[in-house]
Amino acid sequence: MPVSDSLPVSAPDEVRCDIAVVVPAFNEAESLPELVDRIGTTLAGMGRSYEVWIIDDGSTDATFAVVEELAQARPQVHGLCFGRNFGKAAALAAGFEAAAARIVVTMDADLQDDPAEIPALVALIENDGWDLVSGWKQDRKDSFIKNNTSKVFNWFTSRMCGLSLHDFNCGLKAYRGEVTRRVKLYGEMHRYVPALAHLDGFRVTEMPVKHFARKYGQTKYGMDRFVNGFLDLLTVYFLHAKQASPLHFFGRLGLGFLTVGGAISLYHLIYWIMGHALRPRPSLILGLVLIVVAFQFISLGLIAELVVAVRNPETGYRVARRV
């Protein structure tokens, strides 16, 4: 039986098992057998029903052939295979849609994450009431460049999103099922799942986890991801933190430009009233340009308000509990 057809995509409220593990994989054929074996040992020891979803993100090696073999040997293992490489966010989104569990755990396929951490992550959700628990790689086994760009990224993200975490992009996370059904991923938004959940009103925390050096293959990390990550952060900040009122975002920018441009223009107006000739000067032109830009930002905010009102009629809140 083909692995991709082994289970249907889950309905919104369907629950088939206690824990689902979602593993995005891109050219990870060598590491998958050991990873699945360790996941199975850990979850069997917990005495919970579980399933493992491996999402092959358009691999060019034998990754999906390995997934098919694992699925034949273990009924809990299932897989999806993309026609081409769509990225980690798309793989996670597909895994979230396919999984039907009370708690969803994500981890990378490169054996740098330890499946033995899963019970502690799950306990923080079940016993302490957290909705999302993100791993924190305190002792990272990555390159100097990757480690330090990650520190800058985490510091900046924490301050922009109002959620203080040391490691937003750790692949090892545990989610309450409601979180995976609510959070929408696209582009490279997988880095910001904790921020997205926090901005949607879920309770987010972190837990120190072990991190190991890559055993097989090579890292998929590149400097372009740092640039893309920064641009995606701006998207998260605007679309989620300011989605209730775009005019608050654009209006503040517009008022700032208007204040500076108005002050410059007022200076030249007073200068003219005092009897001096009003000749074209760079400062005068700058003041007029800033005023025009200010009204453009304010107009853009008003247009965005209309778009939000028409296309997103939701109230913007999430009810966490009721009696």
Image (cartoon, rainbow, N blue to C red):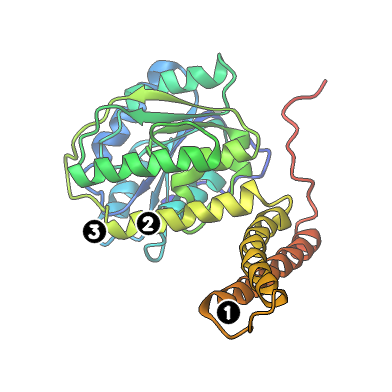
Q: From what the image shows, is residue 161 above or below residue 245?
A: above
Q: Secondary structure at mark 2?
A: loop
Residue 295's tag is: none
On the image, the x and y values in percent for residue 23 come to 39, 42
Could you tell me the amino acid type at mark 1?
Answer: Ile
N-terminal of the two: label 1 or label 3? Answer: 3
Most extreme residue toward the top, as rendered?
A: 127
Query: 119 or 301, which is in the foreground?
Result: 301
Q: In this rendering, would 252 be left or right of 19? A: right
On the image, the x and y values in percent for residue 97 come to 56, 47
Query: 23 or 205, which is in the foreground?
Result: 205
Q: Residue 148's image quarter? A: top left
Mark-to-mark CA distance, 1 and 3: 60 Å
Q: In this rendering, would 233 be left or right of 290? A: left
Q: Residues within 10 Å of mark 3 (few under 14, many from 20)?
A: few
Query: 8 or 318, which is in the foreground?
Result: 318
Q: Secondary structure at mark 1?
A: helix
Query: 176 or 289, which is in the foreground?
Result: 289
Q: Let me know if residue 115 appears in the view.
A: yes
Q: In this rendering, would 295 be left or right of 239? A: right
Label pair 2/1, CB-CB below 8 angstroms: no
Residue 61's tag is: 3
Mark-to-mark CA distance, 3 and 2: 11 Å
Depth check, mark 2 against mark 1: the one in front is 1
List the residue tagged with mark 2.
57
Q: From what the image shows, is residue 23 above or below residue 260?
A: above
Could you tell me the amino acid type at mark 3?
Answer: Asp
Mark-to-mark CA distance, 2 and 1: 53 Å
Q: Let me know if residue 5 appears in the view.
A: no
Depth check, mark 3 against mark 2: the one in front is 2
List the residue tagged with mark 1.
285
